[in-house]
Image: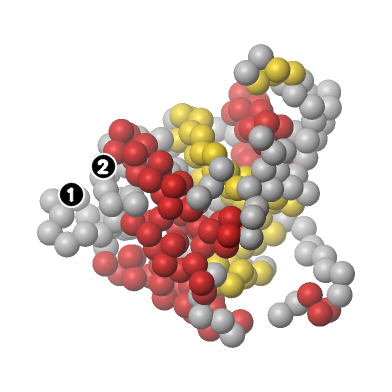
Amino acid sequence: MKLNILAFGAHPDDVELGCSGTIAKEVSLGKKVGIVDLTRGELGTRGSVPIRDAEAKKAAEILGISVRENLSMRDGFFVNDEQHQLEIIKRIRKYRPEIVICNAIDDRHIDHGKGSKLVSDACFLSGLRKIETVHDGVSQEAWRPKVVYHYIQWKNIEPDFVVDISEFIDKKTAAIMAYSSQFYTENSNEPITPIATKNFLESIHYRSQDLGRIVGVEYAEGFTVERYLAVNSLADLK
């Protein structure tokens, strides 16, 4: 299956928090979008692997994506080496996306920066035909995505561009709240974590609202880039 966009997250819920409004918008425009989670979030303080697996499936259904995979890398301990790069390369060559979206380049959780670099390096290597890969018994052809974008996570990184998600903020919220084990719920007996506070839950809206305010829309999501953005005309910019 060829996808237009393939989004990667170090943990289930990373993609939902970072760019699910954009994903929902692209799906509504007829784009085929997939998500690949690197780990199953097994080191998370709250919830469990089976619970998070079910939550990831529910979030995928809410967003209407075409496919979701989990590579079951070690939460907290995966590294950017040949073995892990090849697993990413296999998925890039399998889905042949034009656009890859992945974790923030620098963030509070060490897996986010590691995952960002791992995916970015694999995107480049995937275009080298002398790297041979076989997936599901099929030899794969080289494929390099046209662009790699990074969503914004815990840190308030200055975006290089933003996407208007005003019509999709409710779907973004629903996809995030599919992970009910991870975020703030009143009267929960689970331990408090940095993302399981009322303030963090509210920040999902006020951060998107603030980015939207700056560009003159209601809600927006921000991204950083690895190379210059190019447009055909000044009229393409809003």
Find residue 162 and report its image quarter. Answer: bottom right
Q: Residues within 10 Å of mark 1 (few under 14, many from 20)?
A: some
Q: CA distance from mark 2 to mark 1?
A: 8 Å
Q: Which mark is residue 190?
A: 1
The residue at 48%/63% (across/down) is 155
Q: Secondary structure at mark 1?
A: loop
The residue at 29%/56% (across/down) is 183
The amino acid beneath tag 1 is Glu
Q: For this view, does 166 lie left or right of residue 30?
A: left
- Residue 175, x across and y down, in percent: 41, 55
Q: Which mark is residue 143?
A: none
**Mark positioned earlier in the residue sequence (2 or 1):** 2
The residue at 53%/83% (across/down) is 213
**In front: 52, or 85?**
52
The amino acid beneath tag 2 is Gly
Q: Secondary structure at mark 2?
A: loop
Q: Circle 2 is placed at which residue position?
A: 47
**Could one spot residue 120 in this view of the protein?**
no
- Residue 110, x across and y down, in percent: 47, 46
Q: For this view, does 176 lie left or right of residue 227?
A: left
**Could one spot residue 186 in this view of the protein?**
yes
- Residue 181, x across and y down, in percent: 27, 48
Q: For this view, does 126 lie left or right of residue 91?
A: right
Find residue 233 and report its image quarter. Answer: bottom right
User: Could you tell me if the residues under marks 2 and 1 are in contact, i.e. CB atoms within 8 Å?
Assistant: yes
The quadrant of the image that shows the N terminus is top right
